[in-house]
Image (cartoon, grey):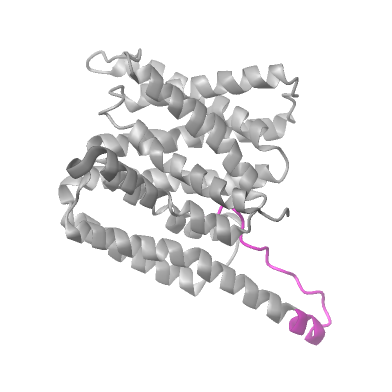
């Protein structure tokens, strides 16, 4: 692993800030399009931009068929994640949406032991209970935003699934190849669903952006995706799992602060909401710290175990980038 520089630290926070800004760009006050149409254009523009760049630099598109299908399928999960994410902000507001998204860490901690056949750790269960206490607090204080919060949590679940699957691809392919095929998979999934949705929709809806919407969608596609997404994957290779997880968990914090600065009192919530959000974020930030302590303790125990046991010691794999 390359040693990160001070510039890398600032860049990682800048990338997370951009990710937090996506909720603002997808808000109906800037882009009034149906979330399905919004994700359609975002994935379309991203796929075209990366494809053109690949041709320009003569980069190979080649990926083994077996892995290609898996990456395209993971792109479908990204599409679901974004649809739920933007849908959450439409039926509530940005703050509620981002607090729901903050539960990604909880979902990942539950999914990884199932996918990798690891035992659940005691602190994962405790943090899960703390998170649910925060969720209950948010629900009780802003029940009229319950649908938005639920969609935000489902978006977090899809994001956790994506992280678990994506952690395998990062070890084999560069970030631009992964991003390109995942965006193609996301676009294909959304395009198919959009066609059926148009036929079944009770009334017609706009499918072409108007005026400034083109600018916001372009920023969402080119800066928040084409630039930020591959750069984020690249930075993950330089930092420890702990550093990445801790920084990425700042996304909802940055997003809520930006929303308040841009939209003012319209994004202001009740004190109990912020108490609940604080409880959730406390659990979220505690997770990478406890993971790091657990891994450190395991490394100290390992040599002693090897001395005592005649059979080879089977080391449990370290936490992956997906644990965020």
Residue 13, percent from left and from top: 50, 49
- What's the residue at 70%, 56% (across, down)? 3
Residue 270, percent from left and from top: 16, 55
For the stretch drawn in magenta, the main secondary structure is: loop
The image quarter containing residue 54 is top right
Q: Extreme bottom residue here?
A: 308
Picture quadrant of residue 198? top left
The answer to whether residue 136 is seen in the rendering is no
Q: Nearer the viewer, residue 30 or 73?
A: 30
Q: With respect to residue 278, does 69 lie above or below?
A: above
Magenta stretch?
A: 303-324
What is the x, y in percent for residue 242? 57, 61
Q: Is residue 311 magenta?
A: yes
- Vertical arrangement, residue 25 with respect to residue 308, above or below: above
| Image-based side of 278 in relation to 315, left or right | left
On the rendered structure, is 43 left or right of 217? right
Q: Residue at x 70, y 17 (%)?
A: 55
Position of the N terminus, as image quadrant, is bottom right
Residue 239 visible at all? yes
Does the segment drawn in magenta span residue 76? no
Q: Nearer the viewer, residue 76 or 251?
A: 251
Of the pair 254 and 192, the residue shown nearer to us: 254
Residue found at x 31% / y 62%: 278
The percent coordinates of residue 277 (x first, y second) are: 30, 58
Left or right for 23, reference 123: left
């Amino acid at each position: 692993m390359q040693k990160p520089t001070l510039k890398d630290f600032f860049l990682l926070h800048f990338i997370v800030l951009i990710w937090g800004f996506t909720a603002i760009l997808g808000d109906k006050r800037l882009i009034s399009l149906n979330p399905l149409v919004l994700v359609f254009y975002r994935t379309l523009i991203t796929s075209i931009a990366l494809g053109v760049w690949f041709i320009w630099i003569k980069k190979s598109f080649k990926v083994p068929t077996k892995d290609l299908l898996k990456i395209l399928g993971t792109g479908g999960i990204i599409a679901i994640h974004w649809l739920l994410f933007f849908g959450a902000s439409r039926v509530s507001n940005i703050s509620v949406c981002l607090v729901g998204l903050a539960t990604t860490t909880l979902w990942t901690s539950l999914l990884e032991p199932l996918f990798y056949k690891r035992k659940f750790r005691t602190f994962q269960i405790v943090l899960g209970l703390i998170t649910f206490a925060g969720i209950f607090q948010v629900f009780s204080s802003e029940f009229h935003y319950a649908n938005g919060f639920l969609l935000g949590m489902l978006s977090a679940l899809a994001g956790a699934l994506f992280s678990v699957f994506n952690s395998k691809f990062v070890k084999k392919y560069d970030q631009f190849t992964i991003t390109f095929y995942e965006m193609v998979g996301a676009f294909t999934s959304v395009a198919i669903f959009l066609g059926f949705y148009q036929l079944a929709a009770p009334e017609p809806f706009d499918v072409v952006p108007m005026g400034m919407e083109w600018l916001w969608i372009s920023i969402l596609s080119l800066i928040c995706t084409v630039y930020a997404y591959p750069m984020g994957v690249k930075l993950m290779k330089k930092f420890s799992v702990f550093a990445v997880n801790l920084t990425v968990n700042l996304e909802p914090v940055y997003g809520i602060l930006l929303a308040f600065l841009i939209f003012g009192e319209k994004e202001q919530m009740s004190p109990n909401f912020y108490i609940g959000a604080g409880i959730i974020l406390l659990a979220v930030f505690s997770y990478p710290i406890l993971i790091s302590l657990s891994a450190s303790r395991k490394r100290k125990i390992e040599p002693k175990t090897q001395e005592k046991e005649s059979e080879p010691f089977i080391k449990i794999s370290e936490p992956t980038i997906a644990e965020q």
